Amino acid sequence: MLSVLLSLSVSRLGLWAAGLILVLGLLKLIRLLLRRQMLARAMDSFPGPPTHWLFGHAQEIQQTGSLDKVVSWAHQFPYAHPLWLGQFLGFLNIYEPDYAKAVYSRGDPKAADLYDFFLQWIGKGLLVLQGPKWYEHRKLLTPGFHYDVLKPYVAVFTNSTHTMLDQWEEKAREDKSFDIFCDVGHMALDSLMKCTFGKGDSGLDHRDSSYHSAVRDLTLLMQERIDSFQYHNDFVYWLTPHGHRFLRACQAAHDHTDHVIRGRKAALKDEKEWEKIQSRRHLDFLDILLGARDENGIKLSDEDLRAEVDTFMFEGHDTTTSGICWFLYCMALYPEHQHRCREEVCEILGDRDSFQWDDLGKMTYLTMCIKESFRLYPPVPQVYRQLSKPVSFVDGRSLPAGSLISLHIYALHRNSAVWPDPEVFDPLRFSPENVATRHPFAFMPFSAGPRNCIGQQFAMNEMKVVTALCLLRFEFALDPLRPPIKMPQLVLRSKNGIHLHLKSLRPDSGKQLC
């Protein structure tokens, strides 16, 4: 009798559980449908490309050539068009300067529907924070990017680059092309480790290399999750092999960051070690974070500290790698500009063997070429916002609060209404006279407005030092059999790498260096 009652109770409990799951699922579906209706109604006045009944535009933007597909849509639909990732997540995709200004001159938060995917990895750092806490963290971190802090990093960039170039000398002797992306990634990580954690000159160890692999996996998995609507639900995602792989990579990245922070905190408890740190030529980013205090004298919590370090490591490593690699590709593609840049840096360097802080401001033609490569190959091709209040656009159309915005930087930078002959590599677009007459929101490699990239000066300095040293050591040429295939992976990568031929310009190679 007892067993019968027990089985009936279990059966009844199972029915209740199934009923509860069904009700919760139904409520979730209703909420999604209402949200979809709100987003679709908001974009009623914006025509766009046809959508798949289930996938929206997701299938098209997952395909090779998706970036140029959006450029073709931009020609068809001036200013903006709806972009649907599945049936429930819709953005207004914008690529026109006045539209960009209307949104990005304000302080609207990042779109939580996508940027919340970052939380498991980088936590609530500057990238995803909003409101008063974002402002507080921005204020605390700004001193870390003052030019007095950035000056000594020129030597750091130089040392890491020379290590990479020495390796390239060996590869260049084989007289065949090779993929530069991975080598540049390791060099950028090595520089960042030194600037962030004060790491010595020993280069990357096994733990650092594991971190580099973890970050590479995380960027790939993040982009795949953004593009695949079936992965947008957390509960579903964490049950998939894709989600398990993401969690493993997160753990590897966190273990690395925690190890370094613990070591530094332990060292700071030793007075002699603190005196040694204070007497160093420069404070690293972690020193500045550990010493940061708000107006009430309160330090960053351990959670905030790790979030900001992980954010800086992600944003300062992958984006710079992308920018350097695509710049060197442009130099190989346009040898006349490569030659002119090399002549300029040779003249600046003179008979010295290393660059100094004041040299960076003299690299005018190199800087124009870097910016033109950023225009054609922006390191971050697409960013997202959620409107905190209504916005009205220059053509009279508008969007209500709560609407989602996608700024397609790649399409903005190839907008033929703004950039004549947009596919042509022309560094003189960034001459002072041309910049003065152009819309301030036409060129946004570091975003714009109050939430622009806090580390853009750091990135530009590293770009200048690394690319100048590369051009002094090597002549770069294309491999016509392996053209790069552009692929957005949070940053702009190449699906098959960036393969270049390198010829050494050292005196013993038979070529004149300067």
Image (cartoon, grey):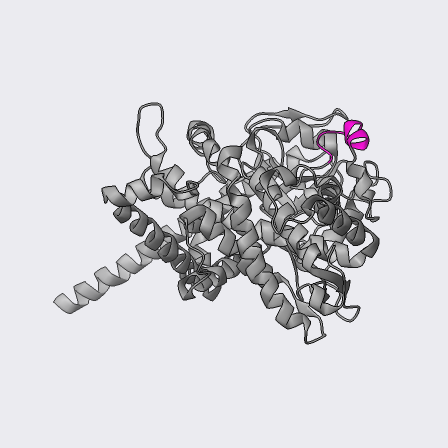
Depth order, front residue of 73/347: 347
Relative to 170, say whether 111 is above or below: above
User: In the visual, does 53 lie left or right of 330?
Assistant: left
| Residue at the farthest front position | 351
Picture quarter with the N terminus: bottom left
Depth order, front residue of 222/187: 187
* x, y percent for residue 330: 75, 54
Relative to 113, say whether 148 is above or below: above
Does 120 lie within the magenta span? no
| Residue at the farthest right position | 421
* x, y percent for residue 315: 53, 47
* x, y percent for residue 306: 38, 46
User: In the visual, does 474 lie left or right of 313?
Assistant: right
Q: Residue at x 59, y 59 (%)?
A: 184
Q: Residue at x 72, y 49 (%)?
A: 346
Q: Which residues are magenta?
A: 432-442
